[in-house]
């Protein structure tokens, strides 16, 4: 059996081709390009491809599946993968250990969602990212007013239409600000950024609302009292295929 273990990297990857019958190994370093992966898969013809979870695992996994190669994605947090007493740790060492663990059937496989499910999950997470950016801009605006000793509307009232109008009375184009009013230019830039982020969030909400209406599982969850679209989205995108769980305890874990 030939096992191709790949230590994935952002720019370069290191592969270890292990022949379990002869225990022979072949190492190769290659660029993290799709064509490089296709070439090494075509040349080595492995019976199993092994890799660990990282930011690029998704598309590499999909590429291997498209080429009809069985893929095993390892959980690097498992006990067998910890490097507590290892003095030397290189990419080759990682690839070799990954191959040996696969040969010994000591790898705890990680579930990799389908591309569509991953994209949906990323979009749900991205909404939280945008909300976080909005909060940071709002906090920056409050700091500007505090530094100048100027009162602004409190709480969420500051971000209503009326509140924004009150804040806007203090803004000024930065190019037109003298040295004593530079903060007004900063305020103008922050308010402009806030408007853009709100537009981004509105666009996201519209798309997520459309996707939620097309997803039967989300619609079913929303029939539960107190469960809205956002909560249902998180549950569905995180759990994905329920058939991968053996029992309810695995779901809760």
Image (cartoon, rainbow, N blue to C red):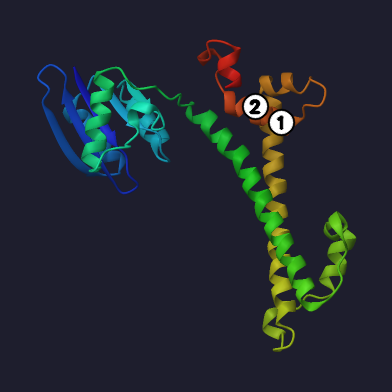
Residue at the image position 71 percent from the left and 55 percent from the top: 135
Is residue 160 among what the camera can see? no
Q: Quadrant of the C terminus?
A: top right
Residue at the image position 17 percent from the left and 39 percent from the top: 28
Q: Nearer the viewer, residue 125 or 147?
A: 147
Q: Quadrant of residue 186?
A: bottom right
Q: Nearer the viewer, residue 69 or 244?
A: 244
Identify the disc placed on residue 46. Answer: none
Within 10 Å of disc 1 (Cα), the crowding (few <14, some 14-19, many 20+) is few
Q: Position of residue 167 (x, y in %)?
A: 83, 69
For the residues marked 2 and 1, what is the alpha-carbon distance in whole angstroms? 6 Å
Is residue 143 among what the camera can see? yes
Q: Is residue 85 above or below residue 75?
A: below
Q: Position of residue 181 (x, y in %)?
A: 74, 84
Q: Position of residue 81 (x, y in %)?
A: 34, 31
Residue at the image position 82 percent from the left and 70 percent from the top: 168
In what element is the residue under mark 2? helix
Q: Quadrant of residue 61?
A: top left
In what element is the residue under mark 1? helix
Which residue position is annotated with label 1? Answer: 231
Q: Is residue 247 left or right of residue 69?
A: right
Q: Are marks 2 and 1 in contact (CB under 8 Å)?
A: yes
Q: Quadrant of residue 65?
A: top left
Which residue position is annotated with label 2? Answer: 235
Q: Nearer the viewer, residue 5 or 107?
A: 107
Q: Residue extending furthest top?
A: 247
Q: Quadrant of the N terminus?
A: top left
Q: Is residue 46 above or below residue 143?
A: above
Residue at the image position 73 percent from the left and 21 percent from the top: 221
């Amino acid at each position: 059996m030939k096992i191709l273990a790949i230590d994935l990297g952002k720019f370069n990857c290191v592969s270890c081709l292990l022949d379990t019958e002869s225990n022979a190994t072949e190492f190769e370093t290659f660029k993290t390009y799709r064509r490089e992966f296709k070439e090494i898969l075509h040349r080595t013809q492995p019976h199993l491809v092994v890799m660990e979870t990282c930011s690029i695992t998704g598309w590499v996994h999909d590429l291997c599946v498209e080429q009809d190669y069985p893929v095993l994605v390892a959980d690097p947090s498992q006990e067998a993968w910890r490097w507590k007493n290892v003095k030397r740790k290189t990419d080759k060492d990682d690839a070799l250990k990954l191959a040996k663990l696969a040969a010994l059937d000591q790898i705890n496989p990680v579930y990799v969602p389908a591309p569509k499910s991953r994209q949906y999950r990323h979009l749900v997470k991205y909404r939280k990212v945008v909300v976080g950016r909005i909060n940071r801009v709002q906090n920056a605006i409050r700091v500007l007013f505090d530094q100048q000793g100027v009162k602004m509307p409190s709480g969420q009232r500051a971000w209503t239409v009326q509140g924004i109008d009150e804040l806007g009375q203090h803004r000024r184009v930065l190019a037109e600000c003298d040295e004593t009013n530079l903060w007004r230019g900063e305020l103008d830039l922050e308010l402009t950024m806030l408007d853009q982020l709100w537009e981004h969030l509105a666009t996201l909400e519209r798309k997520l609302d459309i996707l939620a209406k097309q997803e039967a599982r989300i619609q079913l969850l929303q029939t539960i009292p107190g469960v809205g679209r956002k909560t249902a989205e998180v549950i569905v995108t995180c759990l994905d295929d329920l058939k991968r769980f053996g029992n309810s305890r695995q779901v809760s874990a």
